[in-house]
Amino acid sequence: MLGAGAATTLSFGRINRVAAATALTPNELISKSAGEIAQLIRTRQVSATEVVKACYARIDAVNPRINAVVTQCRERAFAEAAAADALLAQGKIKGALHGVPFTVKDSFDTAGVVSTGGTLGRKEFVPQQDATVVSRVREAGAILLGKTNTPEFTLGGGARETYNLIFGQTYNPYGTGYLCSGSSGGAGAIVAAAGSYFDIGSDYGGSIRGPAFANGIAGLKPTYGRVPRTGHIVDYGGPFDNFQEIGPLARRVADIALLLPIIMGPDWKDAAMAPVPLGDPTTVELSKLRVAWYMDNGTIQASSEVQAIVKQCVGYFTALGCKAHEDRPPRFKELVDTRTAFSNADGHEYMRRMLRKHGTMQTSPALSLGGTPVSSAEFTRLCEHMDTIKSEQLAWFEQYDLILCPVTVRAPQKVPSEFVLPAEVGAGYGGMTSEYNTTGWPAGVVRVGTSKESPGLPLGIHVVAQPWRDDIVIAALSHIEKQTGGWKMPSE
């Protein structure tokens, strides 16, 4: 794999042999994976300028309906594409993503490009430097098209999921008026709609995996400690540090495998990062994986069609000879409830600090600001209780290599009129993802099928592996994708 550093000289022999290949249509271009388009650019079958032009044409076509891309940097993108083409003409390449267009969630800092984080106090904020992950993909040659919508601070969407007071609501590309999940909802929507080859999201409780599920693409929340949070609006440090992970969203699992090595590794700023090598997903022996699967979190049961998706995917592994058991981590719901209490323990003072930091006076309707702080003794007890359960769950996981389970309890739903769901509805509404932010285990999602409950909307599967075995997650997602076909172009 070509690195992300200084330009590398290429041999022109391969380029000359393929340069005369049949031209691709714009629709064929935008349907390619990031890896495929990188190869086409490297071999000069298409120019970076042509690819950027095709992406912006697609954004112009779909964005008025889905409202996924909220800020664009066209002049700079075309200038960078021209520079990429000129460099390639000299037989040099910047990196593995040379000339590949991408978007990034608006919660990440982007040098010279407005980065709001969905909060009014940053409506016109222009950072001077890129977030670590943005810098890394740009150094590898990727070209930023623009920023994608997110709720305020990535946390304030409520029942509307991806909504904020600056840019409004983002919608699912597969169904008019449907939710795209959150908080990386704009990212998931534009990647699914083929306006961008990949995006980078953040996941505090399911914010990569929910949008991957709702928009029918692939997404990965890496192991806690693998990808730096530097330059993200909710970054690193503090009592809630281990809930937040950063990871890629793309149409194909192969692109997840391409992107993760580029964005991972210590940046000497985020103190929680560890230089743990990434295993090769292609060497994972799928037939030897020990599989656990479940349908509920101890209280909430997934819908019948989501249950069918889980059983379908279990079948893909038992057909290889894998041993599979219906089982889930012990005290599953208890850990979720303890995390919730822990997150509310300071009466949301951490959120008020963020508002003061960014100068926001008016907040999104669903941003949680209320609550009464608990005593320091209770705060410490909650910390210890979470750690006790996490230790028990890790011991449980020693007997398995892989977990297959729901991402959320049902297919994507229509955007509700209210921001906060009534209590009688809320209990059956949410996902089953935050557990794995609390444990820090790697987890990913890929499309498996199409919903009948919400006609035409995607359905996906949640795949979890032991800590630092992101390679197993990617290998399992790839195996599932090969059986189902994965991403499908939206018809609307």
Image (cartoon, grey):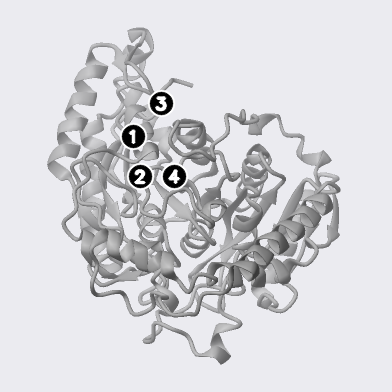
- Distance of mark 2 from mark 4, alpha carbons? 6 Å
Q: Nearer the viewer, residue 372 or 291?
A: 372
Tag on residue 96? 3
Q: Quadrant of the C terminus?
A: bottom left
Q: Mark 3 or mark 4, which is nearer to you?
A: 4
- Distance of mark 1 from mark 2, alpha carbons? 10 Å
Q: Residues within 10 Å of mark 3 (few under 14, many from 20)?
A: many
In terms of secondary structure, where does tag 2 sit?
loop
Residue under pointer 4: 229
Q: Residue at x 45, y 35 (%)?
A: 263
In terms of secondary structure, where does tag 4 sit?
loop
In terms of secondary structure, where does tag 1 sit?
helix
In the image, is residue 384 above or below residue 254?
below
Residue under pointer 1: 135
Which of the two labelled residues, at mark 4 and mark 1, occupies the earlier sequence position? 1
Q: Mark 4 or mark 1, which is nearer to you?
A: 4
Q: Residue at x 45, y 67 (%)?
A: 181
- Distance of mark 3 from mark 2, alpha carbons? 23 Å
> Do residues under tags 1 and 2 come within 8 Å of each other at their CB atoms?
yes
Tag on residue 231? 2
In the image, is residue 249 above or below residue 383?
above
Q: Quadrant of residue 13?
A: top left
In the image, is residue 182 above or below residue 243?
below
> Do residues under tags 2 and 4 come within 8 Å of each other at their CB atoms?
yes
Q: Quadrant of residue 129?
A: top left
Which of the two labelled residues, at mark 1 and mark 2, occupies the earlier sequence position? 1
Which of the two labelled residues, at mark 3 and mark 1, occupies the earlier sequence position? 3
Q: Residues within 10 Å of mark 1 (few under 14, many from 20)?
A: some
In the image, is residue 238 above or below residue 298?
above
